[in-house]
Image (cartoon, rainbow, N blue to C red):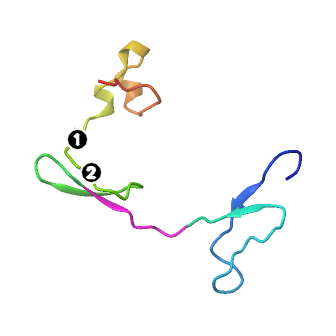
Amino acid sequence: MRKQFLTVQSAMNEGPMPQTIGSIAPWILSVAAGSKNPGLITPVRLGNGIVVNGVSVNPFKLKGMYPLIYAGEVPNITAGFSGSTSRFCIKNSLDNN
């Protein structure tokens, strides 16, 4: 640490030999990071029975059906958003109801 700042970086997956890391600087905190695809495929079952595979960071299965909406159709008008901005899912741009 220098001047109260902690420097952090990826340890990287490609060291000089198998099972080694490429970053060994003693003044930097190296953390594990992966560049390999973890393959977290999550199936989404639509109301019409079609199953679409997507990628998710949630490793659990949902316990029910949830509505699928287009964000541009549910703007938070009270906060001054319109469909042209809510469609990008900007923070607080979607109506909570």
Comparing 27 with 48, the one in front is: 27
Start-end of magenta stretch:
35-43
Image quarter for residue 71? top left
Q: Using residue 54 as the reference point, say whether residue 80 is left or right of it.
A: right
Q: Position of residue 24 (x, y in %)?
A: 78, 71
Residue occupied by mark 2: 62
Comparing 56 with 87, the one in front is: 56
Q: Position of residue 83 (x, y in %)?
A: 35, 24
Is 45 colored magenta in this rendering? no
Q: Residue furthest right?
A: 3
Q: Residue furthest left?
A: 48
Is 36 colored magenta in this rendering? yes
Residue occupied by mark 1: 66
The crowd level at tag 2 (other Cα within 10 Å; few <14, some 14-19, many 20+) is few
CB atoms of marks 2 and 1 within 8 Å = yes
Q: Position of residue 89 (x, y in %)?
A: 41, 33
Q: Amino acid at mark 2?
A: Leu
Q: Amino acid at mark 1?
A: Tyr
**Residue 37 position (above or below residue 78):** below
Comparing 69 with 31, the one in front is: 31
Comparing 22 with 60, the one in front is: 60
